Image (tube, helix red, strand yellow):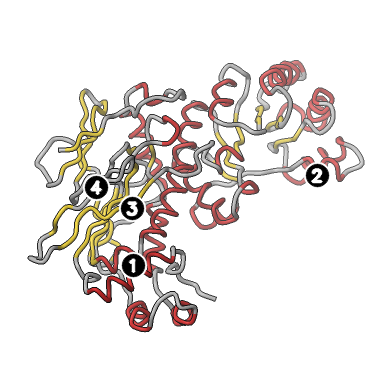
Amino acid sequence: MTTGTALLTDQYELTMLQAALASGAAHRRAVFEVFARRLPGGRRYGVVAGTGRFLDALEDFRFEEQDIEFLCSSGIVDEPTGEFLAGYRFSGNVYGYREGEAFFPGSPIMVVEGTFAEAVLLETVALSILNHDCAIAAAASRMAQAAGDRPLIEMGSRRTHEYAAVAAARAAYLCGFTSTSNLMAGHLHGVPTAGTAAHAFTLLHDSEKDAFRAQIDSLGLGTTLLVDTYDVAEAVRTAVELAGPDLGAVRIDSGDLAVVAVEVRRLLDELGASRTRIVVTGDLDEFAIAALAAAPVDAYGVGTALSTGSGHPTASLVYKLVAREDHTGRLQPVAKASVGKPSVGGRKWAYRRTSGGTATAEVVTREPVETEDRPLLAELVRDGKVVERESLEAARDRHRATLAELPLEACSLSPGDPAVPTIFK
């Protein structure tokens, strides 16, 4: 079984390579850019996430012997192309927005420089990682803003592909979630993990009281008890009877969450458990979280909506050739002119313009410029070697700083224009 990432791609990347090798154009220098023509669903900003995962995939992007045997025996590539793939190593350069940064339509969030043969093969793996992670990050960011200071637990693993769940947990943490139920995300990325019990644990026992006692005995008074398996009020009374005022939290997973939370808070206070927190779960998205702002809720658990991008499971990113070497050896801008799918040719640089600490424009140029505007493209890969990596905590800090820089309208959950215009110069 192959262990690299090279076959995580579309067939047409390899058929283009084969034809370009035959025509002699494969070794022309080329520049590809990743950008979004528009933001999905009228959202006000996008969030860069997945760059670190892409760098990991790039380092593992090798065609192994069994990969090439499969490609040649299946007639996907010819023998000369197979020989090229056997020695494939990306030796070009990659620049990109750092994770946690906001982006807008036209933002060149990743720039890949190399030969056409080297760079075209990275299209699918780059887009599959960035489209997924940026979509999750945008949804998570909106949810975190709606939640304010209340913690968010990511718990969408069972609603998506098993490895997508790990990436989703990483992107969610990057954008403000405090923990995840996914243990692999904790192991691989250091995301704090959380979890206690489902309804099955209560149903397993002869009574709800037996279930609560077993959980408290095992996990301590600070645990979270699920109180909506049968009768919520009776469950809360039983929980406080067993744990006393030091019970950590109760979780509500059904019903009108705002109404039930008010009743549970009243009952907890009456029973002397005023420090016991209330966690709510159950098909929450950013709109439901915002609607619960006035309810006595202490934390939210979010599953399906987060792991599916809250209705937008892709960030609408594309990977387009914007410059290629001509017969004189110079890079010439190239661009599509397709109706509804135009692109802007030329290798680009990007800057964030601010006024009084608030972002006012995304400035995209064809040449690097001396400016007071903040440069957005960082060098990530030089001559095929990764030269910049950063921790997930650093990206998380950047996202907080980026949100503080955006105009107030960026925080609106209603559909609207991008919060910051993109200016091409």
Q: Contact, CB < 8 Å: mark 4 with mark 2?
A: no
Q: Dot 2 surroundings within 10 Å: few (below 14), some, or many (20 or more)?
A: some
Q: Which comes sooner in the sequence, label 1 or label 4?
A: 1
Work out whether 121 lies above or below 207. below
Q: Position of residue 19 (x, y in %)?
A: 31, 72
Q: Helix, strand, or loop for circle 4? A: loop
Asked which secondary structure carries label 1, the reply is helix
Between the residue at mark 4 and the residue at mark 2, the CA separation in whole angstroms equals 50 Å
Q: Position of residue 411 (x, y in %)?
A: 41, 25
Picture layout, residue 231 above or below residue 69 = above
Q: Nearer the viewer, mark 1 or mark 4?
A: 1
Which residue is the site of mark 3? 319
Nearer the viewer's eye, disc 4 or disc 2? 4
| Location of mark 2 (residue) | 201
Q: Nearer the viewer, residue 78 or 228?
A: 78
Please tell me whether mark 3 or mark 1 is closer to you in this view: 1
**Disc nearer the start of the sequence (3/1):** 1
| Residue at disc 3, secondary structure | strand
Mark 2 touching mark 3, by CB under 8 A?
A: no
CA–CA distance between discs 2 and 3?
47 Å
Report, in whole angstroms, how far the alpha carbon at label 1 lies from the one at label 2: 54 Å
Mark 2: secondary structure: helix
Of the residues tagged 2 and 3, which is closer to the observer?
3
Q: Earlier in the sequence, mark 4 or mark 2?
A: 2
Of callouts 2 and 3, the N-terminal one: 2
